[in-house]
Structures are given as structure tokens and as C-alpha cells.
Image: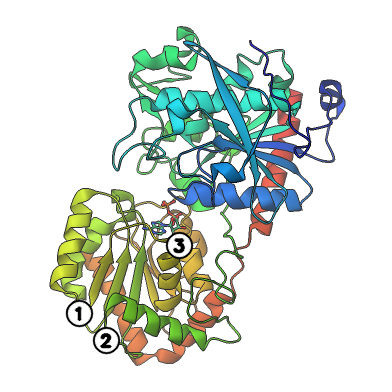
Amino acid sequence: MPRAKTKPRKAVTPAATSVEAARIEAAPAKLKVLFVASECAPFAKTGGLADVAGALPKALHARGIDVRVVMPLYAGMPWSDLEVLDGVLGVPMYWGTAHARVRVGKLPGSEVPVYCLEYNRYFDRPYLYGPPSEGYPDNLERFTFLSRGSLEVCKALGFVPDVIHCNDWQTALVPVYVDTVEWAQPLHGAATIYSIHNLAYQGVFDGGGMFITGLGREHFNPTEFEHFGALNLTKAALRHSTLLSTVSPTYAREIQTPEYGNGLDGVLAARSGELEGILNGIDVDEWNPAADRHLPAAFDVDRPQGKAACKAALQKEAGFPVRADVPLFGIVGRLTPQKGFDVLAHALDRILGWDVQIVLLGTGDDDAQRFFAYVDAHRGDRFRAWLRFDNGRAHRIEAGADFFLMPSRFEPCGLNQMYSLRYGTLPIVRATGGLVDTVTNYDEKTAEGTGFVFADLHPEALANTIGWAVSTWFDRPGHIQIMRDRAMRQDFSWDRAGRRYEDLYRRAVSLRRSR
Ligand code: ADP
């Protein structure tokens, strides 16, 4: 294997670890973790994975863990703010060696280094994964490069991690490489964690593409990559990783069933004892109603007055009548079947018959966009659709709305409902995945709960639950206030999740070393 030639400049501190030291340390006091992700906020983001990659490493670092992030350098990232490391990184590919550059930045407000692999042929493109609803045809090759490249970065830096934390299919080859091409090399000692952020995306390619991974054809077998005739990267990661995790306890259970397992439920159930559900935290600095630069007024649980100003401003922004008495519903998210907006579409006519206002911010499937644009054009008095990605507006919706809608078909964790709770905006959610673990249903008798929960993914059930929220708004406003207070006091900080991941890492290290 070609040796990487990159040497860090002064500003980048290479790990002082020798390979020997890494071997004899049975239970390292200071864990070394490589965190590999295909997106990481604020550098590049299409969804919740980026939020996790931007926040979890900071929480780990605060716990004394030496954590470093590796990701691709995409078009649109702040290239010139990142420090270029000396030398060239040689990444073995099936066609030869890719010579990449490495740029390094830090997660904002932290000392966590983020190594960005600069290889323009793969990543200097308008999208991270491909145009909406499509993947780039060479995605297998692009993310083979990321997976292989992340290990080469370690070698170049002399960084021998105790744990390599991989995230979703774009990094699924890493645990396989650690077990195979790194055999008898220092990185072979690393424990691997594979985190499922969304099992709907598994990295499925034509079986003929196996050669692109650089692994022998013998790995294309039903216990590794082969899945119903196709090449399935996630399947191989589920087999090769030391431990598995996903982003909520309920989703960890759900994906072991045929309904949510997307064909991999059997593989997951076989490793049931080694699959943990750890609820994501949220970035409580970025999502803090008391100090949110996107909001016209600040508020928090002790000074809730500002929320009314945020509502009025959002109504203005939407072109709605500014009225405090009307319940305002917010929706933010990808317009994909996962989010259940097709079910909302079928319920919308009934809902818009009531005295309500709804704002929607989202991008995604063409037919969903067309539908919501149509409703916007015809019912603009109470329905506004903004079909674009707009982070500031997402904040203003979380702050200004009274209720937040998430009728998800499945939801590994979901972040928006946690943002909503923190902003005193009561979530209306379907009982699935992380939504179950974060929102408790309203009890009319006791005013218990932090939101409204329904089980059946059906327009009737959704409309009825929204109707229940609307009637609570008008008939029991005191209960809304009590729930809002309770919602805003919930703790979804990353500290809690960081502790759980550290435990998982330590368990993985001892498992790996015992094997
Ligand atoms: P997922 O990861 O499945 O897309 P999550 O709720 O876990 O869903 O996270 C979605 C993240 O992306 C949130 O931070 C949300 O605010 C953000 N987001 C999604 N769509 C938009 C949009 N159109 N504009 C701004 N932010 C968006």
C-alpha cells in the first residue's frame, strides 16, 4: 500500500502516539476516536447526520476524548478558511492511486479538527450525493475514496485511533477495510462503530461494482456484501463492525422488524445485543431561543414573552393576518415519503377548513413541491409553502409557530421535534422512532405531556390529532401553557449522548482487544 506523504504543518498537532503504545494500552485513559462522515455541519449539510457530526465530536472532546473528524471537501465549503496541509495523500483506488490534498479546519467553538479530503474529480460538484431524488452514478467510487482516504489520513498523521466511528453507508467500507486490507497493520487494532442514521439509505449498487471497492470478489457473498443479488454496503458494515448503534432506542427496536428493517432486519436482529439506540442531542447553542441571531425577539422558559413577537413576525413573513389568537402550525423538512407529507396532503383540505395558519419550509420530491405550491397559490390566506432550504427561516418557524407537525412514516431520531420542544412549540408527531422517545402524549385530564401523538399513518388520524390540538388551543389554553413550559425544560443536550457514546466506545475497545 502506498505510504501517505502528508505531514501536518505546525498548526496541526499530530498524535503523539506510537503504534506500540496503542497496542499495550489495555483500557486507554484518553480515548482516540476517528469520526468519519459524509457531511458535517456547518461545513456541508443535507440532513440530521450533519448536525450529529457537527455536535457529537464536540461533546466527546469535552469529555477528554481526542476526536478527529474526516469528511470530503465539497464545492461550497469555505475552502480558503481551511488550512492546507503539506504534501499529498495517496489513496489506493481500484484504478491506481488518487492523490488528494487535505485541508483542516475546526468545528466552530472547539478544538476538534476536521480533515477535509480535497479531490475535485469526486467532490467539486453542485450536490453532495446527486441532484434531488438521484444519486451520482459514481457514488460507490466517491465514497470508496472517502472510506479508504479516512484511513490514509490516520496513517499520514500518525494517529492510531482506538475507535473509528462510521456513519451511514458512505462510510460503510471502513469497518471492512479495517478487517481486511489493514490486517496486521496498526489500524487493524481499532474498534469500529457503525451508526445507522437512516436505514432507508443503504448504499445499494450493482453487484458488478464490487471491484470498485478494491476488495476481492470473494467478499461478494451473502454474509458480507451480497444482498438479494445486489451489492449492499450497509450489510457488510453490519457484519464487520465491532458494535452497532442507531440514533434512538425505539428505532433500534424497529429496524429489527420487517416493517422498518428495509430488508436488513434479519441481519440486525442477529446482532441485537450489539446494537444500541442512543438518542441524538441537539446543538443547544445553535438552537437557543434566548440567543438566536435569526429571531426578532429572544425568549426562554422564564421570559416567554418574546415568543409572541416571533409569532407575529412569522405571520408577517408568511403574509398572513397577524393574530395572536389563531393557532399557527410549522413544518420544516425534506419532502420525501419518509416524512409522511403525502398523508398530510390528503388531510390538508379538512385542516384548512378550520381557523388555522400553516407554514411549510422544505425541498424534495417534485410532486410534493408542486402540490404544496398549488395549495399555497389557492389557500394563501392560511397556507404558505417556502420550497427552499433556508436555515434562518427554519429557526423562525420553530420560534414563531405554536405547533410543529411531523407525521413521519419512520423517523430514526428526528431533530426538529426537539428544536420545537426547546422553542415551546408543541410537536404533533406520529408514534415512530425517536419521536416516541422525545415527545410524550397530552393527557386532557392532567395536562401531562409535551405534544400530541398519533399511531396510524392515515389522513384521518392526522387530521383528528391536529383537530385535538386546535380544540385544546381554544378550549384549554391553560394546558397549552403548562405543556409549553414543560417542553422548554426538557434537556436534549449532547452531554448525555456523549456519555453514552463514550461507554459504547469503551465497550467496543475491550471487545476488539479480546478478539
Ligand atoms: P432528516 O435528517 O431526516 O432530514 P431531521 O429532523 O433529523 O431530519 O433533521 C433535519 C434538519 O435539517 C434540521 O436541522 C432541519 O431544520 C433541517 N432542514 C430540513 N429541511 C430544511 C429546509 N428546507 N430549510 C432549512 N432547514 C431544513
Quadrant where the N terminus is found in the figure: top right
Type of amino acid under label 2: Pro
Q: Indicate left or right for 89 with 314 as reference.
A: right
Identify residue for label 3. Answer: 416
Tell me the element at label 3: helix
Q: Between marks 3 and 2, how big is the CA–CA gap?
A: 26 Å
Answer yes or no: do the residues labelled 1 and 3 have beta carbons within 8 Å?
no
Residue at 34% in and 31% down: 136
Q: Which is more toward the observer, 150 or 267?
A: 150
Q: Between marks 1 and 3, how big is the CA–CA gap?
A: 25 Å
Q: Earlier in the sequence, mark 1 or mark 2?
A: 2
Identify residue for label 2. Answer: 321
Which quadrant contains ligand 1? bottom left
Q: Earlier in the sequence, mark 1 or mark 3?
A: 1
Answer yes or no: do the residues labelled 1 and 2 have beta carbons within 8 Å?
yes
Disc 1: CA contacts within 10 A as few (<14), some (14-19) or many (>=20) = some
**Rendered image: mark on residue 381:** 1
**Rendered image: mark on residue 71:** none
Circle 3 or circle 2, nearest the eye: 2
Disc 3: CA contacts within 10 A as few (<14), some (14-19) or many (>=20) = many
Tell me the element at label 2: loop
Type of amino acid under label 1: Asp
Residue 303, relative to residue 137: is it above or below? below
Disc 2: CA contacts within 10 A as few (<14), some (14-19) or many (>=20) = few
**Residue 365 percent coordinates (x, y):** 25, 49
Type of amino acid under label 3: Asn
